Image (cartoon, rainbow, N blue to C red):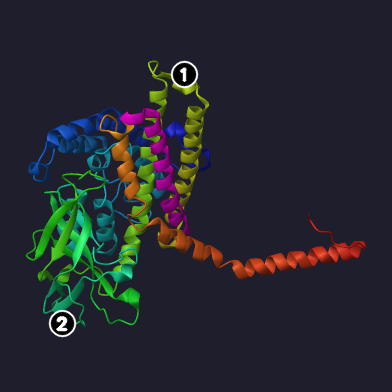
Amino acid sequence: MSASSQIPHLVAGLVSDRAKKTLDTVQKFVEEDCIPADALLQVQLGEGAQRWSMVPPVIDELKAQAKKLGLWNIFLSKTHYKEGAGFTNLEYGLIAEQLGKSRVASEAMNCSAPDTGNMEVLAKYGNDAQKKEWLAPLLEGQIRSAFLMTERPVASSDATNISLTMKREGNEYVLNGSVCMMETGPFMLKVLTGEKKWWSSGAGDPRCKIYIVMGKSNPAHPDKFRRQSVILVPAGTKGVIVKRMLSVYGYDDAPHGHAEITFENARVPASNLVLGEGRGFEIIQGRLGPGRIHHCMRSLGAAERALEWMIARVNDPTRTTFGKPLHEHGTILNWIATSRLDIDAARLLVLAAAHRIDTSDAKGALKEIAEVKIMVPQVSLSVIDRAVQAFGAAGVCQDTPLAEMWAQQRTLRIADGPDEVHLQQLGRNENRRGGILREKIEEQRRKAEELVRQFGAKSKSHL
C-alpha cells in the first residue's frame, strides 16, 4: 500500500500532489534500498578504531541515488526557508516518518541530525559569509557538522547553567572554563578553557568540519537569557580536544558518534559569532523547536517498523504456543491493536504541530511541540517493547533491529530537553487558566442555583 494512500483524511487537503508523489518515491527508496543497506553499512564499518576514520561507501552511493531521485534537503520548509525542496513542515512530517524506518535513510537524503538543525541555524541566522563557507557545503552534503551545547559538569536541562564562557580579545574569541566579566575589545572574542561539552553528536565523523557551539559571553548580564551566544568553531581548531566517544546503551553510532570535547584557549574569529552577542537562547530555541518535531516524525517511522516486525513474527507458522499460533492469543492481538491506536493518535498530534509551525513559527507552536516531544518517544518505546516481547530472547540481540531502535528512541526522552522540562512547561502554561476556570465554574454554579430558585425548588446533591 502506498504511503500517500494512508495520509490521514484530516490533513490530506494540506498535502500537495507533488508532496504525495515524493512521499511514495521516498517510501520505495527506503523500503527497497535503504533498509537493505543498513546491514551493508555495518559490514563496511568493520571493527576497531578504523570505524572512526572512514565512511562506508554505501552512504555516498545512496546519496548519489537520492539526488537523482530529487530526494534532497526536503527538511527545509518552504514556509520559512528558500534553500529547501519546497515542502511544508506537515508534508515533511509524512516523509520523515518513512526515514525513521532506516538508519541510513536520513543521511542518504541529507536530512539527518544534527546537520538539519545546524543548517536551519545558518539559513535563518547566519550572515552571507557564514552561509557561503558552511551552509553551502552542508546543503551539498560535502561536509557534516556537530552541535555542542550539553555540558558534563552542570545540569544542562536548564540551559542557563551552560558555563563554557566566551571572552572577547581583539578580533578573536578564546574558549576557557572560568567565569569572567566580558572585556569590550572592538575586534575579538575569546572562548575560555576547562569546561567539557559532551553528547556532541556528529563530532566523530571524519567529514565533520564545523561545530555550532553555545557558550556564555556575558555572565554578568542582568537578564539570564541574554548571557549566552552561539559561535561557529571549525573542527580541528587548536585547543578543541575530542576526549572520547560515548556509547548509547552500548551502541557507539560510528562514524557519526557522540563526543566529549574540552576547550582549552581555543581561539575563534569574532566573525564566526552568529547573529550577535546575547542571542544564544533566541537561536537555540529557533533550532530546537523544528529539531524536536523532526525527531518525533522519525520516531513514528521506527514505531511502524517495529509493529511490522511484531506482526510478521506472530504470523510465523513455526511459532506456536499452547497448541495455537501466536497471533491467535488474545494478548498478542491486544498488543497489535494498542500499537495501531497509539501510532495513529501520535501521528495526528505530530502533524498538528507541524501545521502550527507552518502557519506561525516554532515559537507559536511551543505547546504542540512540547506535546509531541513528550508523547511520541513514549509511544515508540511502548510499541518497540511489545515487539521485543513478541520475539522473546531474539528481540534483545543483534538478530533484529529492535534493540538498537529501542536504544535510539530511549535517548529522545532526554535529548533536546527531557520529558520533565516539557511537562513542567506544558503544565505551567495549562495551569494559567486556573483563575479563569474558577470564575467560569462559579458563574455556572450561580446560574444553576438561580434557575432552580426560579423553578421554585431546592438544589439537590448529585450523590
* Nearer to us in this view, 49 or 326: 326
Q: Which mark is residue 322?
A: 1
Write the residue at 42% across / 41% down: 382
191, above or below 140, in the image: below
Write the residue at 42% across / 20% down: 315
Give the mark, 1 or 2, whose residue is nearer the N terminus: 2
Q: Amino acid at mark 1?
A: Phe
Q: Is residue 135 left or right of residue 411?
A: left
Q: Is residue 236 magenta?
A: no
Callouts 1 and 2 close, C-beta under 8 Å: no
Q: Is residue 373 magenta?
A: yes
Tell me the element at label 1. Answer: loop
Q: Which residues are magenta?
A: 367-394
| Residue corresponding to mark 2 | 186
The picture places residue 256, in percent across and down from the top left corner, at 18, 47
Q: Which mark is residue 97?
A: none
The picture places residue 120, in percent across and down from the top left corner, at 28, 56
The picture places residue 206, in percent across and down from the top left corner, at 11, 49
Quarter of the rendering containing residue 110: top left
Q: Amino acid at mark 2?
A: Pro
Quarter of the rendering containing residue 416: bottom left
* Nearer to us in this view, 437 or 125: 437
Q: Is residue 20 left or right of residue 131?
A: right
Between the C-alphas of marks 1 and 2, the distance is: 79 Å
Write the residue at 47% across / 55% down: 368
Farthest right residue in view: 456
Q: Is residue 337 left or right of residue 316?
A: right
346, above or below 232, in the image: above
